[in-house]
């Protein structure tokens, strides 16, 4: 049985706690590795070593740090297939999806190659007699990244690229369900020239997370995961005086107007709701057609598309549309929620429960599931299902659809399908959600914009990646300086002042 390690001071190091968590093959249900769960002492030791490595890295000029990012980006590209395979092996997503996972992380690394430009600071010449002001962005020191299971490459890359390009050291605590990819990325960074100790990967669970939150050396905590844990981490990190950004779960709505291109809307909905088995924080899980005619036309198009989906292990090739859920518990929970939808009166149009694939009978597969006539009181509407389940809530008007979206406690992503520019513009302006798609189902912004949800989907002031990453991972210091050569005796300023 493979024993996963930690990555400390540039080396793979075995955990010493004697506590382990199983890493499953979600397609077969077999345990394929065990991952150590670090103790507080192991976490504190990794932090102390990172603190020793950080000052030299922070003092390295930004262009050199950017060169490490450039080499890292090249190495990610060279190792794309290996990284994608590692993602699929532990997560279960298809290889094209896994490549996308790596690619969207790589794009953030590419943005961070512009660190010298992003870190330039500001300057005011002659703010008063002989007075100049300048501001500089300085690294925070040692920061922590805590990441979820559903993007084993992308989210660790979002966290580490910004933190390291700004000159910080980082302790990365990846999800214990998918630990391998983060270790591979750490090794590639080392090959790219990152000094030992600047990125430490520590595997663990609540004990190691709490150790990160309580250690005074950690200056900032960047978290992505479910909302209850995001709230907990935000509260504990900020109570301990740390900067924190904590991104949580989602319930993303897509409004379909009567004038939308129905075939395109149906294509988009199937991919956005069922892709990656619905285990995406930007998945569309609620379709809100406006008017019964629109709703009926949509269901008519969704059903054949859903029935044509192929569910299977990633090893079955590129024609598989999506793979298993992450754990047996996740499968049980999703199937339980489907049952609750039936019990609470929603119309089950396609039922994904009880799917058994030959040769993979113990895998965590759930078939694509569509509900119609869902109402906001039902558990399938209230809960983030995180499975291949799409709920259709019928709305009588655009205003009703907008209100439903705005009343939802989550605010990660949303979309509207329409041919009308006025409606689209109104929606984009009024909706209280962080990322909006117009005829675009999963509006994950490009790496030079920034990613972040509102309401229960995000806690903290700044978003992930893009310019906000450079704000989050640095402190601004402003210097006001005066030199006296320009001032004549008696205090009169030598240069003519503007009135
Ligand atoms: P999770 O909250 O269970 O775990 C996330 C991280 O927190 C993991 O590293 C885990 O080890 C740690 N953790 C878990 N329980 C903890 C506890 N009690 N105390 C301290 N740490 C704990 O999330 P997950 O199941 O791995 O990921 C899925 C969730 O992440 C979904 O809700 C999804 O919407 C969300 N997500 C959000 C975004 C975003 O940007 N908003 C992106 C991806 C995923």
Image: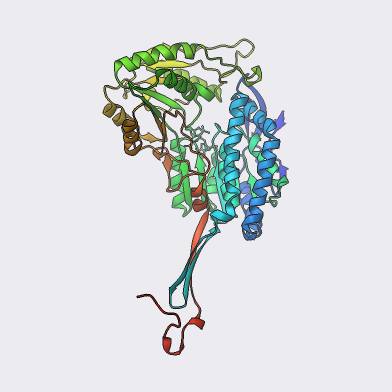
In-front residue for pair 262/288: 262
Q: Nearer the viewer, residue 94 or 482?
A: 482
**Screen quadrant of the N terminus:** top right
Color theme of the render: rainbow
> Could you say which quadrant of the image residue 91 lies in?
top right
Left or right of residue 354: residue 296:
left
Q: Position of residue 125 (x, y in %)?
A: 47, 70
To which quarter of the image does residue 424 belong? top left
Q: Is residue 6 visible?
A: no
Residue lying at 53% horizontally and 12% vertically, measured from the top left: 355
Q: Residue at x 56, y 20 (%)?
A: 322
What is the residue that sits farthest to the bottom in this orientation?
490
Q: How many marks?
A: 0
Residue at 54%, 35% in the rendered image: 148
Residue 32 lies, with reference to residue 43, above or below; the image says above
Residue 135 coordinates in the image, percent (x, y):
49, 64
The answer to whether residue 143 is above or below residue 229 is below
Res. 229 visible in picture: yes
- The residue nearer to you, when weighing 21 against 173, is 173
Q: Is residue 139 above or below residue 490?
A: above
Residue 292 at x, y percent in the picture? 30, 16
Residue 363 vs residue 449, the one in the foreground: 449
Q: Residue 445 location in percent, x, y? A: 48, 38
Q: In the rendered view, does 324 fall on the left or right side of 480?
A: right
């Amino acid at each position: 049985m493979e024993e996963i390690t930690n990555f400390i001071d540039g080396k793979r190091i075995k955990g010493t706690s004697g506590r382990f968590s199983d890493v499953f093959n979600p397609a077969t249900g077999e345990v394929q590795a065990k991952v150590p769960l670090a103790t507080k002492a192991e976490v504190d030791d990794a932090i102390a070593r990172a603190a020793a490595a950080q000052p030299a890295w922070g003092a390295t000029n930004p262009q050199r740090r950017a060169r490490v990012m450039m080499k890292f980006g090249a190495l990610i590209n060279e190792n794309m297939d290996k990284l994608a395979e590692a993602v699929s092996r532990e997560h279960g997503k298809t290889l094209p999806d896994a490549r996308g996972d790596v690619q969207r992380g790589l794009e953030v690394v590419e943005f961070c190659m512009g660190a010298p430009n992003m870190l330039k600071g500001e300057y005011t010449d002659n703010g008063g007699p002989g007075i100049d002001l300048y501001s500089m962005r300085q690294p925070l020191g040692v920061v922590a990244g805590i990441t979820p299971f559903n993007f084993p490459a992308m989210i660790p890359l979002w966290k580490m690229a910004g933190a390291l390009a700004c000159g910080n050291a980082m302790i990365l605590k990846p999800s214990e369900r998918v630990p391998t990819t983060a270790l591979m990325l750490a090794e590639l960074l080392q090959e790219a020239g990152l000094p030992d100790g600047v990125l430490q990967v520590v595997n663990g669970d609540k004990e190691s997370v709490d150790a990160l939150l309580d250690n005074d050396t950690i200056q900032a905590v960047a978290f992505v995961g479910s909302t209850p844990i995001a709230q907990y981490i935000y509260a504990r990190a900020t109570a301990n005086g740390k900067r924190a950004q904590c991104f949580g779960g989602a319930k993303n709505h897509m409004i379909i107007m009567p004038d939308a291109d129905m075939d395109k809307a149906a294509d988009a909905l199937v991919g956005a709701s069922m892709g990656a088995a619905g285990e995406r924080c930007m998945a569309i899980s609620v379709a809100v057609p406006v008017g019964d005619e629109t709703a009926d036309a949509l269901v008519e198009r969704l059903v054949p598309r859903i029935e044509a989906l192929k569910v299977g292990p990633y090893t079955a090739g590129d024609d598989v549309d999506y793979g298993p859920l992450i754990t047996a518990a996740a499968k049980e929970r999703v199937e339980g929620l489907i049952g609750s939808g039936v019990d609470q009166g929603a119309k089950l149009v396609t039922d994904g429960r009880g799917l058994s694939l030959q040769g993979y009978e113990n895998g965590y597969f759930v078939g694509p599931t569509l509900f119609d006539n869902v109402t906001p009181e039902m558990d399938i509407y209230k809960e983030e299902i995180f499975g291949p389940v799409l709920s259709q809530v019928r709305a009588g008007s655009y205003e009703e659809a907008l209100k439903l979206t705005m009343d939802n406690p989550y605010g990660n992503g949303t979309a509207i399908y329409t041919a009308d520019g006025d409606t689209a513009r109104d929606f984009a302006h009024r909706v209280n959600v962080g990322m909006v798609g117009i005829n675009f189902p999963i509006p994950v912004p490009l790496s030079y914009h920034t990613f972040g949800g509102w309401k229960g989907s995000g806690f903290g002031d700044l978003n992930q990646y893009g310019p906000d990453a450079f704000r989050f991972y640095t402190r601004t210091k402003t210097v006001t300086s005066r030199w006296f050569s320009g001032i004549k005796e008696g205090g009169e300023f030598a240069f003519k002042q503007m009135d």
